[in-house]
Image: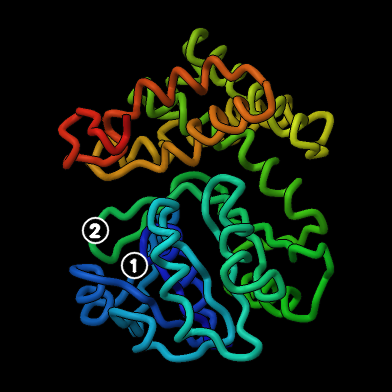
Amino acid sequence: MRIAVMGAGAVGCFLGGKLALAGEEVVFIARGERLRALTEEGLRIVEGSGETLVRQTAAVGNPEGAGTVDAVVLCVKLFDLPAAIEALAPLLGPETFVVTTQNGVEAALNVAHAVGEERVIGGAVWVVASMTGPTVVECTGAWAGIEVAEMSGDHSARIETFAAACRRAGIDCTIGDDLERMLWSKFVLLSATSATTALTRQPIGYVRNDPIALQTARACIRETMAVAAARGVRLPEDLESTAMHQLCEEMAADAKASQLVDLELGRPLELEHLSGAIHRMGLEAGVATPVHTTVFAALRPFMRGDASGGKLTAATD
């Protein structure tokens, strides 16, 4: 397949790099130093003690430079999603589909509103990764997979083709039949790890070893599940215990949620779409979300990164 990766951050470079290594025709849409480095230096993927170099990486500064593709893997941050949606048109041919990989539970629907449900495959990425250099993506822990689902729930030929390409690339890929359930099942854990690691400024190991932080994480999980239930989402009955097991037993002790990484580096945060979304949806559904609301309040001054100076502006009040 010819695949455009829009958003050459950690997730985009991981997925795109692995697919390129497996022989897919991948073009990254990047900007600034990342664009230059991808073009001139290639891409390095670090997994555990191993490192792989993707020697030839195609990268362009805008979608027009890529032209139409078979698939767009959309890896931009949630706050950049509206602009990315507006820029999709040059990439879309008659059969092009868009795979969303964003955190939260609303990205696939937002993209579908713009380009049509028939073009959208929703994805939930399970990888703890960060950029440790302009073109170096480092993965922490054993998770390196993606779940995908059509909005209709069908197992289409195109989703089978995309999943097969991922598997050839060494990316564990499973196909679901209920997109909403899939996204919320990930969001239950993600919202808790994003909240607790960013609030404490500590990695997962601290959260699970400190009884108060762990209690807070469990409360976050329960609040997210309560909001999902109020919205009619049918989650697995054992999801709370599964999420706690993943946090306490499966995640690497030094892993940090991407929100903490962004906070430490002074970048804008996806807060409005994480704890902020649970706060908003809780209000809409009449469900109390005191922990997520507190996290939202505590981190709001830093939502815009260094530019905010830790102060709310009129636009965010």
Residue 312 % position (x, y): 24, 29
On the rendered structure, is 226 left or right of 126? right
Question: Which residue is rendered at x = 55% and y = 59% of the image?
Answer: 101
Question: Which residue is nearer to you in this view: 87 or 238?
Answer: 87
Q: Residue at x 69, y 61 (%)?
A: 148
Q: Say which amino acid is labelled 1.
A: Arg
Q: Position of residue 57 (x, y in %)?
A: 35, 82
**Amino acid at the residue labelled 2:** Gly
Q: Quadrant of the C terminus?
A: top left
* Residue farthest along the front direction in this orientation: 314
Q: Say which residue appears at 20% left-offset and 69% top-offset.
A: 32
Q: Which residue is mark 2?
A: 133
Residue 30 circle label: none
In this view of the protein, which residue sits in the foreground, 124 or 153?
153
Distance from disc 1 to disc 2, alpha carbons, whole Å, reads 9 Å
SS at badge 1: strand
Which structural element holds mark 2? Answer: strand
Q: Which residue is mark 1?
A: 44
Question: Residue 298 location in percent, x, y?
Answer: 35, 21
Compared with residue 153, is residue 86 higher up or lower down, i.e. above or below?
below
